Image (tube, rainbow, N blue to C red):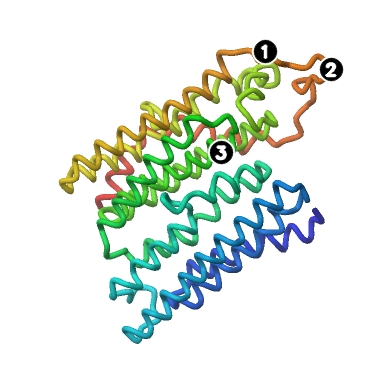
């Protein structure tokens, strides 16, 4: 892609998110979300591959449906209450409609079906933007409206955690596994949103760091399915040794960074008297942990049985910058000791 066009599109992505962040009026927030969608579409379709075009079309249709629902709900709210401010969503009908529209935008179950399919059709760089940056603007709106229907949030959160666990079990494509991982993590964030928005933000931040590391590892190995991962030990042995730690951090195992948000969320849910919900969420984390362990096993403990003798992908030198990967990997593995400081900041 032309670097000038790329710069304009990335600027559009940043501007759309910033407009949504800064807006207090529903029309402005909607406009920011639309700018976000329109800026990423050329990035998604840039390779002119049928899968990429199909993924782009699916993404455009789902985001357009979510944006139309959001606009309709905000107009309904203005009609019922005379208010256009984001914080003034008092009526339960527009509040629920907006929550569901934003859930569709970020891919919460049961409105998640588009996410694995879209992510599977994209390259890893655009997939990383879709899994991280594109979640920011809708999350900012969810945090601002503080959805009044608490049962809806808990249902969305638990369903997403369970679907994210079940859905990834049978996958061999890495991008689909990462999509289901994204759905499960978003479920955890939504579960605790009404009780502690600061823990939701912390979970979002740690999810971004861990996902960034995972995508960069797969990009460095040029891996798109589990079989390709098995050849990675010849390309980057040190990275192959560290990758299981990154994946287990995504799964939420102590003593890695990913354990911190899950620990705080389970603690908060138990404090609120939602022990059954916390138990179900913890059990759903075991489902996710299974497919992370499967990836770790394929990467670190197996040698691929089906290497073609004519192609030797591990002999090609990588041109990718490894500094961002080194920094994000260190954060993905080592931040758990900061938990007391983070807890003090959250309660202050």
Which comes before the other along the chain, label 1 or label 3? 3
Q: In the picture shown, does residue 291 fall above or below 273?
A: above
Disc 3 element = helix
The residue at the point 30 percent across, 50 percent down is 192
Residue 12: image quadrant is bottom right
Which comes before the other along the chain, label 2 or label 1? 1
Q: CA distance from mark 2 to mark 1?
A: 14 Å
**Image location (x, y in percent) of residue 82:** 35, 87
2 and 1 marks in contact (CB < 8 Å):
no
The residue at the point 61 percent across, 55 percent down is 58
Q: Which residue is mark 1?
A: 305
Which comes before the other along the chain, label 3 or label 2? 3
Q: In the picture shown, does residue 292 fall above or below 147?
A: above
Question: How many marks are shown on the rendered structure?
Answer: 3
Q: CA distance from mark 3 to mark 2?
A: 29 Å
**Image location (x, y in percent) of residue 318:** 75, 30
Task: Give the class, few, some or many, for how many residues have Cα within 10 Å of label 3's Cα (few <14, many ≥20).
Answer: many
Q: Residue furthest left?
A: 273
Q: Is residue 326 rendered to the left or right of residue 319?
A: left
Task: Give the class, few, some or many, for how many residues have Cα within 10 Å of label 2's Cα (few <14, many ≥20).
Answer: few
Depth order, front residue of 66/203 = 66
The residue at the point 40 percent across, 67 percent down is 98
**Image location (x, y in percent) of residue 43:** 70, 55
Q: Which residue is mark 3?
A: 176
The residue at the point 40 percent across, 81 percent down is 84
Q: CA distance from mark 1 to mark 3?
A: 23 Å
Disc 1 element = loop
Depth order, front residue of 344/316 = 316
Q: Which residue is mark 2?
A: 310
**Image location (x, y in percent) of residue 280:** 27, 37
Q: In the picture shown, does residue 128 fall above or below 7?
A: above
Q: In the picture shown, does residue 192 fall above or below 328?
A: below
């Amino acid at each position: 892609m032309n670097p000038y066009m790329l710069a304009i599109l990335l600027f559009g992505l940043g501007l759309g998110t910033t407009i949504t962040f800064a807006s207090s009026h529903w029309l402005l927030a909607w406009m920011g979300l639309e700018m976000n969608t329109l800026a990423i579409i050329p990035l998604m379709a840039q390779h002119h591959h049928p899968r990429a075009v199909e993924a782009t079309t699916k993404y455009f249709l789902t985001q357009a449906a979510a944006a139309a629902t959001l606009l309709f709900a905000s107009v309904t709210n203005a009609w019922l209450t005379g208010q256009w401010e984001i914080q003034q969503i008092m009526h339960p009908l527009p509040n629920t409609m907006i929550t569901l529209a934003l859930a569709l935008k970020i891919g919460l179950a049961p409105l998640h079906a588009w996410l694995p399919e879209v992510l599977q059709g994209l390259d890893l760089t655009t997939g990383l933007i879709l899994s991280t940056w594109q979640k920011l603007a809708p999350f900012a709106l969810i945090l601002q409206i503080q959805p009044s229907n608490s049962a809806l949030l808990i249902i969305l959160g638990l369903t997403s955690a369970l679907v994210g666990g079940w859905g990834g079990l049978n996958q061999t494509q890495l991008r689909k596994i990462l999509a289901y991982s994204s759905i499960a993590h978003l479920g955890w964030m939504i579960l605790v949103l009404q009780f502690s928005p600061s823990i939701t933000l912390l979970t979002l931040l740690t999810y971004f760091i861990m996902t960034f590391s995972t995508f960069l590892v797969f990009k460095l190995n040029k891996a798109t399915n589990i079989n390709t991962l098995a050849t990675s030990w010849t390309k980057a042995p040190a990275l192959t040794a560290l990758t299981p730690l990154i994946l287990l951090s995504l799964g939420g195992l102590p003593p890695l960074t990913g354990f911190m948000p899950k620990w705080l969320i389970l603690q908060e849910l138990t404090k609120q008297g939602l022990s059954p919900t916390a138990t179900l969420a913890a059990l759903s984390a075991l489902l996710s942990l299974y497919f992370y362990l499967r990836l770790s096993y394929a990467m670190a403990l197996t040698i691929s049985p089906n290497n073609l003798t004519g192609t030797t992908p591990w002999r090609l030198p990588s041109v990718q910058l490894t500094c961002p990967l080194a920094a994000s990997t260190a954060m993905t593995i080592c931040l758990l000791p900061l938990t007391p400081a983070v807890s003090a900041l959250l309660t202050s």
